[in-house]
Amino acid sequence: MIEIDGLRMEFTGFALRNINLLVGNDEFFTLLGPTGAGKTLILEAIAGVSPIHGGSIRLDGRDVTRLPPEERGVGIVYQDYALFPHLSVKENVVYGLRYRRKDLGDASDWVDWLMERLGIRSLANRSPLTLSGGEKQRVTLARALAVRPSVLLLDEPLSALDPNFREEIRELLKKLHKELRISFLMVTHDFSEALFLSERAAIINRGRIEQVGPVSEVFRKPSSPFVAEFVGMKNVFRADFNGARAMLGGLELRLSRSPVGHKEYIAIRPEDVLIGMESSSIDDPNAFHGELCERIDRGLYHEVSIRKESLIFKAVLTKRDFFALDLQERADVGVTIDPSAIHVF
């Protein structure tokens, strides 16, 4: 378990203030945010390798705020591997044990099991310089786990890998978490990684936590414009509300229910903006015509932008649907949005 209470870290031009997080026993938790948001600083504060200026950190109920790194029971995996090039794979894996022999005793069986489980036993005498990215990440994981940590910290563990290795290590992380049942805290800027690996997530922006909750809830019900855009809700508009209606300048959209409390925005996922040459019903305010102003080939799908007065709606189409509709720029197209697909916050 990780408990962060009122964490404060101040540096020239940047600060983390009032960071509060609770990662449960055996939970896989993800901290998400863009580059420079402060994600890695939080990991380094937990590990004890960066100074903090206020607040407290508890691991499994033990206050470690002032303890040195080797006494915290934490393993950390960096995105750039941080392996020692002058040591063999086996020497890298056991490196941290020299500081914890009193706690671990003879750890050779555990290390052998780890290296076998991570598929690196045959690499034991190799230099890290001869390894692929996926192999380096496996060695880094083994080194972090060799000290039997109560918490494993993962700093963008997939970002430096090519797609094939990324999939491989992602599956491995999921299996390791199930087998070891210790708390995993991963930081990343890729929401798809959180969707696959995590139970809960927090979104951080400019040193401030914007939302914490189950990954599915953060994905479906963002609490701020930043979170909405970060999780892929590319259609975010300021709105005025009148009962179950949202007014966006000259466009009025019907909602599934009247908002409760003070709300300022609506957000719609691009896959919920349905495109056709004709809108569904001329009497439905959620069915209207607009002008196709941009189309972008994203590989597996096309992203299209539709202008309706001063608003730009983004939608996605499969390649098959895109070519079947034969959409041309400046074409007049129909747009339909289901009221239940409109998120209000």
Image (cartoon, helix red, strand yellow):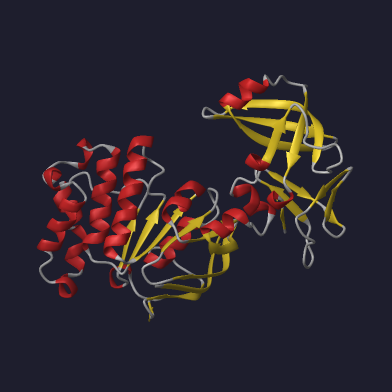
Percent x, y for residue 312?
A: 76, 36
The image quarter in which residue 323 lies: top right
Res 128 → quadrant: top left
In the shown orientation, is residue 13 left or right of residue 22? right
Most foreground residue, 279 or 153: 279
Quarter of the image with the C terminus in it: bottom right
Above or below, comparing residue 135 to residue 17 in the picture: above
Q: Residue at x 31, y 66 (%)?
A: 181
**Which one is in front, 86 or 294?**
294
Q: Which residue is pictured at 58% across the width and 58% down the height?
A: 218
For residue 106, side relative to residue 16 (left or right): left
> Would residue 285 appear left or right of 85 to someone viewing this image?
right
- Residue 137: image location, x then y, percent: 29, 46
User: In the depicted view, which residue is nearer to us: 264 or 288?
Assistant: 288
| Residue under the point 14% across and 43% down | 123
Is 79 or 65 nearer to us in this picture?
A: 79
Image coordinates for residue 60, horizontal then vertical, percent? 36, 77
Q: Is residue 169 above or below residue 101?
A: above
The answer to whether residue 114 is seen in the rendering is yes
